[in-house]
């Protein structure tokens, strides 16, 4: 009696394994939820805050600055404009409405930029700096992303006489339903401001240079859901 060749046996095993896989998931069972893109998930969670404003406080400012621009002033973030790929968050320091954080999504990465304006809406020379995400960490209750200064920002800092800022790494942290953190770190420098998400504020005036009212927000993205096969 002729025995089947090893090649024929291997082919039979592949066919058998493929057939078994095609039978799963069984009727009525839920397929596993697809793994979410971390950039999309952080963007989605932040978009859920759109339209709200929150009060913050400085929790770290090293080294201390004698001419501290934040001392004694209300620190307010306003998740003001939320598009499908960009979120704009003005950061008001008292009556100074010159600062806006701009978070955008590019595939599996995020980008954080800083838009600085004068009261007449003109861009400040030190504006448009930031970087792309080098790390995004997501779990069920929190999210964090780090943004080292990109080459254009490093060149801008050096051109404007701020070479130490070329080492900047900005971070955002979102503790779902509780707090949002903006952080700047570099050797010898740490700035961290924390916003309380449990107590929304009245909507502040628009940032300098922005239209009023804010553009309509895009419909929030939904998290991926498991599909039930029938």
Image (cartoon, helix red, strand yellow):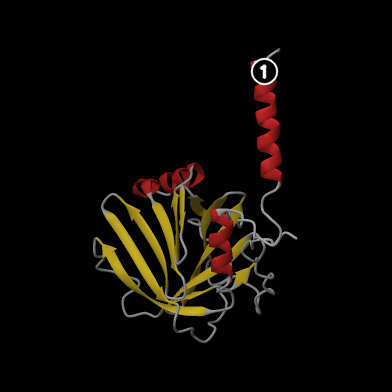
State which quadrant residue 213 falls in: bottom right
Looking at the rendered image, the quarter that the C terminus falls into is bottom right
The single residue placed furthest to the bottom in the displayed view is 202
> Against 10, is 170 above or below?
below
In depth, the one of 80 and 100 nearer the eye is 80
Which quadrant is the N terminus positioned in?
Answer: top right
Residue furthest top in the image: 2
Q: Residue at x 46, y 60 (%)?
A: 139
| Up/down of 55 relative to 162, above or below | below
Q: Tell me the element at label 1.
A: helix
Q: Is residue 123 visible?
A: no
Name the residue rendered at 44%, 44% in the picture. 154
The residue tagged 1 is 7
Is residue 156 depicted above or below 90 in this figure? above
**Coordinates of residue 73 in the picture (x, y in percent):** 37, 79
* Residue 16 percent across, percent down from the top left: 68, 35
Give the crowd class for mark 1: few <14, some 14-19, many >=20 residues within 10 Å: few
Question: Which residue is situated farthest in the right direction here?
Answer: 230
Q: Residue at x 67, y 72 (%)?
A: 217
């Amino acid at each position: 009696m002729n025995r089947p060749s090893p090649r024929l046996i291997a082919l039979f095993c592949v066919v058998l394994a493929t057939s078994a896989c095609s039978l799963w998931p069984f009727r009525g069972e839920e397929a596993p939820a697809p793994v979410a893109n971390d950039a999309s998930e952080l963007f989605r969670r932040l978009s859920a805050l759109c339209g709200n404003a929150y009060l913050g406080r400085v929790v770290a400012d090293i080294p201390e600055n004698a001419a501290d621009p934040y001392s004694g002033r209300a620190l307010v973030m306003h998740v003001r404009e939320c598009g499908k790929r960009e979120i704009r968050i003005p950061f008001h320091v008292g009556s100074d409405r010159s600062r806006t954080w701009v978070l955008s999504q590019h595939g599996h990465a995020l980008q954080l930029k800083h838009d600085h304006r004068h009261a007449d809406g003109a861009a400040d020379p030190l504006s448009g700096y930031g970087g792309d995400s080098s790390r995004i960490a997501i779990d069920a209750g929190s999210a964090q992303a780090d943004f080292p200064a990109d080459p254009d920002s490093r060149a801008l800092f050096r051109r404007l006489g701020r070479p130490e800022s070329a080492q900047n790494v900005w971070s955002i942290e979102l503790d779902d339903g509780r707090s949002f953190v903006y952080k700047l770190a570099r050797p010898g420098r740490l700035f961290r401001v924390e916003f309380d998400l449990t107590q929304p504020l009245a909507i502040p005036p628009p940032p300098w240079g922005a239209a009023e009212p804010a553009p309509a927000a895009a419909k929030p993205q939904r998290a991926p859901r498991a599909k039930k096969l029938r």
